[in-house]
Amino acid sequence: MKIRKVVIPAAGYGTRFLPMTKASPKEMLPVIDKPIIQYVVEEAVTSGIEDIIIVTGSNKRAIEDHFDFNGELESYLEKVGKFKELEEIRRIAQMANFIYIRQKGPYGNGTPVLNAESVIGDEPFAVLWGDQFTWAEKPRLKQMIEVFEQYKDPVVSFVKAKSDADFDRYGVAEVKPVADNVYEMIKIVEKPGKKDAPSDLVADGGYILTPDIFAALKSTDLGKGDELWLTDGINKLKQNHKLYACEVQDGQYHDTGNKLEYLKANIDFALKRDDIKDELGKYLKNLEL
């Protein structure tokens, strides 16, 4: 069955970016001139997704406004002859069918997925976090969809660790090889540290799940911090499925919910921009570090 829908959890408080996130969603932090969540949505749309299901909270109205039409702004841009900008903001609203759900239930990253059950129905779907993304020439989600279409079982995306610190920050996959960038996943070890890491594959927040994840989450006890964890639900799927790990090819993971990684993402993307890269390059070279 074709993957048509993606769930993007975006209801968190964003406490690592306080006070900026006191009234503004962390997902709307800009990487250059585009909010983080737009990179996530564009990845999904380029991968063939039709329905974007964003699970939000009470202070996330800006996300809905961003992906909506703005007649007043469009009229102004047309009046002053800014047609390039007009075309871009119209494109944003037309990218996909946007559906918004308010998060309800216990804390934890399994809750927003469970909240989307009535919209997903009985079909496989993708999950991408709204405050981080992996950039790849061939989109990460498209690579994952190809793995799912071949093996018909849940898929989790991973990238190669960039530093020893990654083993302390992210889940690491214990796997056995299946194909070039595909592995059967035995388990995910949460933040094992370099010494105890079962591989060099760290989770980057992409999932393709089958609809039985909803029953698995409903039968999952609250875990650490009295939160409902998506990983616990995914582990239950092993009763009826194999789980696959997709190592993203030529991908660069941007953990933009982390202050330092957020700054790095801005620099990385600025250095790809023809209108910015030369002057920024000169500035960085002249810094007395």
Image: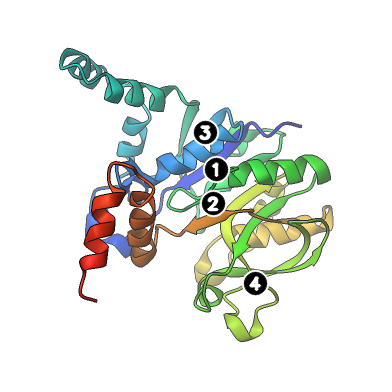
Separation of residues labelled 4 and 1 (CA atoms): 33 Å
At label 2, the amino acid type is Thr
Q: Position of residue 271 (x, y in %)?
A: 35, 52
Mark closer to the chain start, 2 or 4: 2
What whole-number distance in Å separates the C-alpha atoms at marks 3 and 2? 17 Å
In the rendered image, which residue does mark 1 sit on?
Answer: 115
In front of the other: 169 or 212: 169
Q: Which residue is mark 3?
A: 52
Residue 200's disc is: 4
Identify the image quadrant of the N terminus. Answer: top right
The mark closer to the camera, 4 or 1, is: 4
Measured along the vertical axis of the image, is residue 187 above or below residue 78? below
The answer for how far apart the CA atoms under marks 2 and 4 are is: 29 Å
Q: Position of residue 89 (x, y in %)?
A: 33, 26
Amino acid type assigned to the residue bearing label 3 in the image: Ile
Circle 1 SS class: helix
Q: Which marked residue is nearer to the observer: mark 3 or mark 2?
A: 3
Q: Do the CB atoms of the residues marked 4 and 1 lie less than 8 Å apart?
A: no
Farthest-out residue, left: 80
